[in-house]
Image (spheres, rainbow, N blue to C red):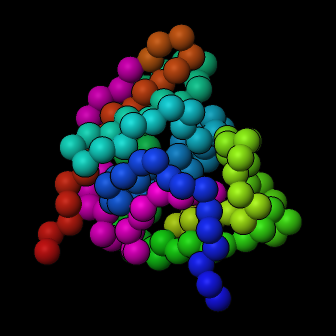
Amino acid sequence: MEEPILNSHNKDEYPPAHTAEHILNRTMDNMFHCGRSRVNHIERKKSKCNYDLPEPLTDEQVRQVEARVNEVIGQDLPVISKYVTRDEIPDGIDLSRLPQNASDTLRLVYVGDYDVCPCLGSHVEHTSQIGEFRITSTSFNEGSFRIVFRLTPPAE
């Protein structure tokens, strides 16, 4: 099958950090029912994601998030893409953040059976290629909880 033509993507992400963002988003939503990050900035040196929460997470909750993300990374899950039409979107996939001009064919990115979402970004092939996930700081401002994270690359 010929690869579909999708909307252009204006970001050049670091695939390990971008894939870690997918895992972090699913973890945050699973644990705190806050949805995916509404603002994020994903880079090689450090990345940040903001979540809509009524109050900041405790230090213990932050450590639980970090531990869960590393647990998922350690499962060496495959990261695959599937192209689907809007009619084929599985239940529970939020399309509200897609741009108005999004194409009729979408690329869904699956991190094993842990996460799936529409995405045009670059990803690793297996979660073991991400390395260790470390939350280096957090902050809270008017209903927005920011997580700053870094990755330690996996040993060769």
Q: Is residue 109 left or right of residue 104?
A: left
Which residue occupies 20% across, 66% down? Answer: 154
Report if residue 132 is visible in the image. yes
Within the image, what quadrant is residue 35 found in?
Answer: top right
Q: Nearer the viewer, residue 39 or 56?
A: 39
Is residue 135 shown in magenta?
A: yes
Residue 28 vertical position relative to residue 108 in the rendered view, above or below: above
The foreground one among 114 and 5 is 5
- Range of magenta residues: 116-139
Instruction: Check the image and name the residue furthest to the left.
Output: 156
* Picture residue at 32% right of the left edge, 55% below the top: 14
Question: Magenta stretch containing residue 138, yes or no?
Answer: yes
Asked if 103 appears above or below 64 in the picture, the reply is below
- At horizontal 40% and vertical 53% (from top left) the residue drawn is 18
| Image spot of residue 91 (x, y percent) | 81, 60
The residue under the point 26% across, 61% down is 131
Identify the image quadrant of the C terminus.
bottom left
Q: Position of residue 78 (x, y in %)?
A: 47, 76
Q: Answer with the quarter of the image where residue 81 lies.
A: bottom right
